[in-house]
Image (tube, rainbow, N blue to C red):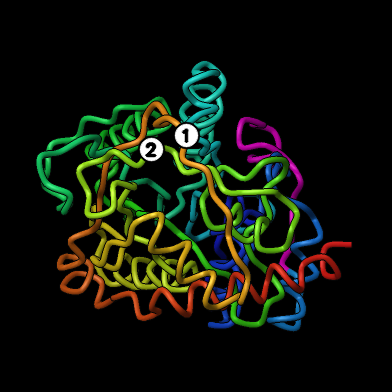
Amino acid sequence: MTSTILVTGGLGYIGSHTAVELMERGFDVVILDNLSNSSESVLGGIEKITGKKPKTYIGDIRDREMLQTIFKTDHIDSVMHFAGLKAVGEGEEKPLLYLDNNVTGSITLFDAIMKAEVKRVIFSSSATVYGESDTFKYTEDMPLNPINVYGKTKLKVEEILRELKKTNPTLGIAILRYFNPVGAHPSGYIGENPKGTPNNLMPYIADVAMGIREKLFIFGDDYPTPDGTGLRDYIHVKDLALGHIAALNKLEAHTDLITVNLGTGKPFSVLDLTQVFEVVSGKKIPYEVVSRRKGDVAGCFADPTLAKELLRWEALSDINAMCKDIWRWQQNKINIIR
């Protein structure tokens, strides 16, 4: 019998790429998305890649009646929970919005999951739960001390899941801590397409390369890093999606609670990424250094050892492939999202 997976935030950047990988492996996918930072046009891209459209509900994870309808109608086996607000700066300005959406929304979703007796939950967490550290290399057993509201909401949801596991030992839970997703599907049919001003580095660089934006703003060049700009672990979104497949396979074999970093273990600075994108695109990326952004750390990258051991997964795409795929998407999306 084919498993049915509910993908919350499934029209968003990471959710849509994961939906594609699930569908290509024969899973039935049901998407729930409130379109706060996504578009229904993504369904067209998913259909071009997979040959079919997933069943989709336009709604919010805080809508109890809609959740009840989904779980009753679609016989969900597993939930991949991507839905949430994720802009660090916005979280600092609007903490109640982030707490309501990310934490209260997750509680509402988990309540529906428990009532429906769903077997597995895979949660989209973040490396921001670690906060600042004496070392830039992050392992899963490090102290958790997020320094921004967004990271605090992710940690709070992790804590809720750990409590759920205590009272529901048959529930399989995977907490996946992402580093910095970039890139796009190699087909060029889906990719990151944020509404308004991009909060992430790569789509902003791509906009500058296209002439949509005048220049890139680099938030600080006085960090204790080789070139003074922030060091990050950039992971291709397709590799990240495959990490979710690996976690699902693990939970299907063993009803565990696992917490795993998903990253490459290879850090690049903001200037590194900008220079690679210039080579790939053939475009000059003008930039201006401005003051540091509240809530940012100097550097962080994953220790991917546990993911390799536990999930038999590792990131395969290099920084050049990430830049090539986002540039292909950037050039194609004007026609795709019309």
Q: Secondary structure at mark 2?
A: loop
- How much space separates mark 2 and mark 1, taking CA atoms? 6 Å
Asked if marks 2 and 1 touch (Cβ < 8 Å), the reply is yes
Residue 332 locus on image (x, y percent): 76, 73
Residue 85 vertical placement versus 20 (above, below): above
Question: Is 19 rendered above or below residue 200?
Answer: below
Q: Quadrant of residue 101?
A: top right
Q: Residues within 10 Å of mark 1 (few under 14, many from 20)?
A: few
In this orientation, which residue lies closer to the viewer: 45 or 62? Answer: 45
Please, what is the three-letter code of the amino acid marked with disc 1?
Val
Residue 6 visible at all: no
Quadrant containing the C terminus is bottom right
Residue at the (31%, 63%) spot, across then down: 263
* Kind of residue at disc 2: Gly
Front in this rendered view, residue 160 or 185: 185
Inspect this view and state whether residue 161 appears.
yes
Q: Is residue 68 magenta?
A: yes
The residue where tag 2 is placed is 220
Residue under numbered circle 1: 290
Residue drawn at x 49%, y 73% as measured from the top left: 322
Numbered mark located on residue 8 in the image: none
